[in-house]
Image (spheres, grey):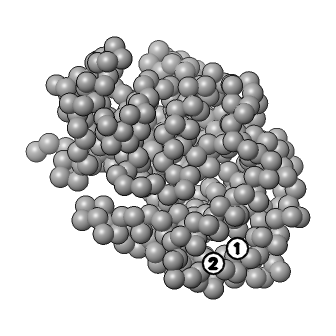
Amino acid sequence: MTDVDPRFRSPEATVAQPWDRLAAELARHGLHLDTDIAPRQFAGGLANLNYLVSVDGSPTVLRRPPPGPSAEGANDMAREWRVLCRLGAGYPLAPRGVHFCTDPAVLGAQFQLLEYRDGVAVGATVPSALAAAALPAPPARPGTSNAGTSNAGTSNAGTSNAGTSNAGTSNAGTVPERLTAILLGAMAALHALDPASVGLGELGRPKGFLGRQVEGWARRAAAVYPDGLPAAADAVIGWLRHAVADVPAGEVRLIHCDFKFDNMLVDPVTLASVAVLDWDMTTRGDPLFDLAVLLSYWIEPDDPPALHELRQVPSLEPGFPRREQVAAAYFAAAGRPPAELGFHLALARLRLAIAWRQLYRRFADDPVAGPRYAAFARIADAVLGWTADLTGSRT
């Protein structure tokens, strides 16, 4: 019996692409699609479609939007390509761009090919491949040496510096503690980067960033609730509109806008970060929003039970810190004083709820993808209700 690789969809659940047209497009640009190696669709991701293909003998990732119209600001392949063509010069966790195609006649939408990085992603649970990751070597006992556990067995010979970063390593604590520290270190390293130093000093419109986010998600909310906003959504949007004027503008930094575990690949042995993925929403703005987006997914055991269905990060598993501890660890990693996050977290939760509603409306009737999104409307309403209660208590 052939082992099933959980990283990939089954052939029956794979969304087929016109591989002959892709091969012809690549040939026009001096690239060769190795058609003798069958493409495989990655199982992760909630919207964009990602495939492992072989180009000129090297594993490569094909990335494209899902079929059909995209929601406002979503699935922006051109933005992601712009970012990844520049970011790697200062942030080695960003994969390198290989090819970008703007012609929808090829695959039905713009698409890109990206460098493949081999690693493990973490979702709602810690994969078994990581649960037993190597712990730091214990202190040598008197009369012994570390010669038997030297770096020779885990040398850098098999991993290039282009795929790792000192900000993405942690050698202390349990696996949950180390994974959290690695994620926050990678986030802090991105926020420490001067956008102009990598040619992204003109990306986005950072002035008025938070106010535009409020209005943008209010528009999207109106679109996903065509019969009128539920009371909870109306209350959260009203609170945000009133509160935004009193929120400090914050620094202008590169922000990912979806920096969470399943968008980071780690080495299964050392847990070092190998890559950060999904840059299609990257912009310049307030780095506290990036932190708040992560915390919006970070459900705790004593949160309302309906929220436990969210399952986007493994925060409900034993050993993972609470939101307050995650925020404190980020501020320590970033070398910045703690800041009030109430507004940013309410905005991030509105974003989460409306994005989940968008995904539900787009995919609920899909015979293949639909079951995965069946609970998204219920989760969205639970997040909105919870956020309305929290913001109401802050009025």
Kind of residue sitting beneath label 1: Ile
Q: Is residue 354 left or right of residue 117?
A: right
Q: Are marks 2 and 1 in contact (CB under 8 Å)?
A: yes
SS class of the residue under badge 1?
A: helix
Residue 304 coordinates in the image, percent (x, y) = 58, 80
* Residue 60 in which image quadrant: top left
**Few, some or many residues within 10 Å of mark 1 (<14, 14–19, 20+):** many
Q: Nearer the viewer, residue 257 or 91?
A: 257
Residue 130 coordinates in the image, percent (x, y) = 44, 44
Kind of residue sitting beneath label 2: Ala
The residue labelled by disc 1 is: 237
What is the residue that sits farthest to the bottom in this orientation? Answer: 231
Cα distance between the residues tagged 2 and 1 = 6 Å
Q: Nearer the viewer, residue 45 or 327?
A: 45
The residue labelled by disc 2 is: 233
Q: Nearer the viewer, residue 371 or 282?
A: 282
Q: Is residue 272 left or right of residue 254?
A: left
Q: Is residue 105 above or below residue 68?
A: above
Q: Is residue 234 above or below residue 312?
A: below
Q: Which mark is residue 263?
A: none
* Residue 141 in which image quadrant: top right
Residue 69 coordinates in the image, percent (x, y) = 42, 55
Residue shown at 52%/32% (left/top)?
A: 81
What is the residue that sits farthest to the left in this orientation? Answer: 1
Q: Quadrant of the N terminus?
A: top left
